[in-house]
Amino acid sequence: MSEQYDLLIIGGGPAGLSAAIYGARARLKTGILEKGAIGGQAFTTREIVNFPGFASTSGPILVKALAEHAKGFGAEIIAEEVTSVDLCGEVKQINTKKGHSYQARAIILAPGAQPRLLNIPGEKALRGNGVSYCATCDAEFYQDQDVVVVGNGDAAIEEAMYITKFARKVTIIVIHDEGIVDCNRASAEKAFHHRQIEFVWNSVLTEIKGDLEVAAVVLKNLKTGELTEMPANGVFIYVGMIPGTGFLKNQVELDKCGYIIAEPSMETSAEGVFAAGDATVKYLRQVVTAANDGAVAAVAAERYLEEEHSFKQEIMNAETPVLLAFWNPANSECINWLLHLEALASVIEKRVKLVKIDISRKKRLAQRYKVEEIPSVVVLNKGNLLRQVTGEVGARCFRLDDSKLAGLIENHYKNS
């Protein structure tokens, strides 16, 4: 049998852990599915000095604190790899590599993204000890030292420029002929004329050397085949990122690179499904922004569940027809109109139930009934649409001829 949760989070990095803290604290039955070490990329980070409140800490220490915080509120961490999902319908299903299945009414997708590796000797062994994929995270550790940057796209060149604030010299390894780079021309020109930056053309990295930390790199000239060893204190690799979204094809909307497209509320294209962290389309991928995403996603998921519960109790299970009155308290036209509608509902109070929907807070219901203008009224019975009037014309219609609404409701009872 599938185990059921209120909220399931796929991914146990800072985004997923932050979401779990907020979800579990809201008394939702919350689970995190994580295939590897808790903490994601942050777990492999040697030192973190830009997370608010922590002047200096390590990735493992920070993510352990986040995990303990989440578990302290009751969140469950499940060591399983998600292989497929079905995100349609009210209850979502998650299937894992171990053959288990889990169900939840709300999902947060936080599978993270991994840097594309060169897969050369020394890269994995020295990751976090001189091999980095994030200048914002690690550049300051190379004050007055020599570093190598691999790559020539926008990210590589812009990050190389950032590293020059700290390093003595930055050498950029480029696979192309001299003068050819893949980044935008403005950044290229700045880099070409920067006194701390040098370029090595027609070359690739074949090995990273060092015992406990990076000491040197081995370069191969693609035209001559010549191997050259170059001293270096650090290596920054920018050959692309791979979002962990392979299992989400045809489930939520992704961009051309496979990143999840989400609203500011972190809601995805699938109802009841939210996203957070590095696997989303975003401007900055850092531990602090991932934690922020997780908090937003969890609060949005909690409100979604609350809204769905209220919808069932107040609307779907109502014994009488329901008037959904969509309004905005900031709109004076809406306030006057709502007072009129409340008076009408009081006359036929035993025959109808009035439910007021503040569209500024409950946009999902407005989207469900395609309400684009306010004030608007939707008349339902057991969730079935009886009548809908939208905007000022619809509002005037109700004011001018309330007998039509009353007659509609009375006819419903005569025919039932």
Image: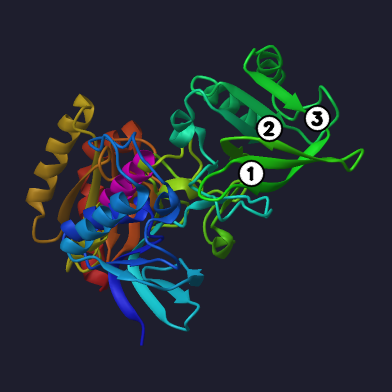
Q: Is residue 362 left or right of residue 84?
A: left
Q: Do callouts 2 and 1 mark residues in contact (Cβ within 8 Å)?
A: yes
Indicate the quadrant where residue 11 lies: bottom left
Residue plotted at (43% across, 55% down): 40
Mark linked to residue 240: 1
Which element carries disc 2, helix, strand or loop? Answer: loop
Residue that protrudes farthest toward the front in the picture: 211
Mark linked to residue 180: none
Q: Position of residue 245 (x, y in %)?
A: 54, 58
Q: Is residue 91 above or below residue 101?
A: above
Q: Position of residue 139 (x, y in %)?
A: 48, 31
The numbered mark, 1 or 3, whose residue comes first in the sequence reads 3
Judging by the rendered image, the residue that carries numbered circle 3 is 201
Q: Position of residue 194 (x, y in %)?
A: 65, 13
| Number of the front mark, 1 or 3 | 3
Judging by the rendered image, the residue that carries numbered circle 2 is 153
Q: Few, some or many C-alpha atoms within 10 Å of disc 2 (few <14, some 14-19, many ≥20)? A: some
Report, in whole angstroms, how far the alpha carbon at label 1 lies from the one at label 3.
Answer: 19 Å
Q: Amino acid at mark 1?
A: Gly
Q: Amino acid at mark 2?
A: Gly
